[in-house]
Image (tube, rainbow, N blue to C red):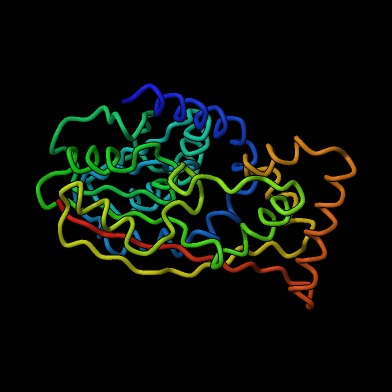
Amino acid sequence: MEQQNRKISEKQKAAWNKFSGGWKKWDVALNQHMQPATDGIISLLKPAGSQLILDIAAGTGEPGLSIASMLSSGKVIITDLADEMLDIARENGSKKGLTNVEFRACDVSELPFADNTFDGVSCRMGFMFFPDMLLAAQEIRRVLKPRGRIVTTVWSTADKNFWATAMGETINRNLQIPIPNPEAPGIFRCGKSGLMTTIFKQAGFKNISENELLCKLNCGTAEIYWEMMTEIAAPVVAALSDADDVMRAKIKREVYELINKTFLDGNVVLDGSSLLIYAEK
C-alpha cells in the first residue's frame, strides 16, 4: 500500500476509534436506518450451510452478525479498520449468542487471508472510505473462491440523502467549507450510478449489477437528530470544532429550523438512498 494511502487509513482508524462510543450509543437506530442495505446484501449473497463469509468494514457488526445467524455450519470473519468498533461487534455477537464468528482488525487494501478463501464477501457502506477502491476490489477478488460473490452498498448522491445533508450543507454554507475533491474518501464519493460497477469490472469481476435502495433515519425530533450526528460523524464534529460559540449556535439553530420546517408534524424521519452492487469472481 502506498505511503499516502497508509496515512489516510491511519487517520480514518483514529477517527472511527474516537467515535466508536457514539456508534455504540446509536447502534439500534443506525442499524434500523441501514436495514434495507443489510437485507439487500443478504438477499444477493444468499449465505447458507457451511459457507465461509468475509464481512469488511463491519463497524459494530452488521451485516456479518446477521449472516452468521443464517449459517448452519459455516463461519463469518468480521473485519474493520478500527479495533474499538470491533469491540462493539464482539459484544453484539456475544449478546446474540453467536459462536461462528471471528473478528480481525485489518485494512481492506492488505487483507491477511490466502487466495481463494471465501465463498462470499459483504461490505456495507465501506467502499467510499477506502483510499484506493480499485486495490480494495482487487484484494476482495483475490480472497474470493472462483464464482464467489461480493455484495456491497454505498451511499447514493447527496440530493437523495437528506439525513446527511440537513446537517452537512448547513455547516458548509455557514463555514464556507471548500468543496472536497470528489475522488477523495467521503460519504458520497461512490454515489454516481455506474462508478462502482466500473471499478468491479476493472478489478476482473463479472455478472455485475447495481440497484437503488431507499431507507429512513428515524430520529423523532430535531434535538435527537443533532445529538446523533454530533456523536457519530467525524466531519461534522471537526467542522464545528473550528467554529466559535456564536457560529456553532447559529448552525444549530438553522439545523433545527430546517428540520422542524420539513417535518411539521414533529415526527422526524429523514430520507436516504444507497446503491446495492453485486459481482462474481
Q: In this view, does 156 lie above or below 4?
A: below
* Closest to the observer, 27 or 264: 264
Q: In this view, does 91 lie above or below 182?
A: above
Look at 21% across and 61% down and name the residue there.
208
**Residue 143 image-quadrant placement:** top left
Percent x, y of residue 264: 79, 77
Q: Is residue 119 left or right of residue 245?
A: left
Report the number of discs.
0
Look at 27% across and 38% down and name the residue there.
135
Which of the image's four quarters has the N terminus?
top left
Percent x, y of residue 97: 43, 43
* Closest to the observer, 231 or 104: 231
Percent x, y of residue 133: 33, 42
Residue furthest toward the right? 246
Q: Is residue 271 above or below residue 54?
A: below
Residue furthest toward the bottom? 265
Look at 31% across and 60% down and name the residue there.
277
Percent x, y of residue 70: 31, 55
Residue furthest toward the top? 3
Q: Is residue 252 left or right of residue 126?
A: right
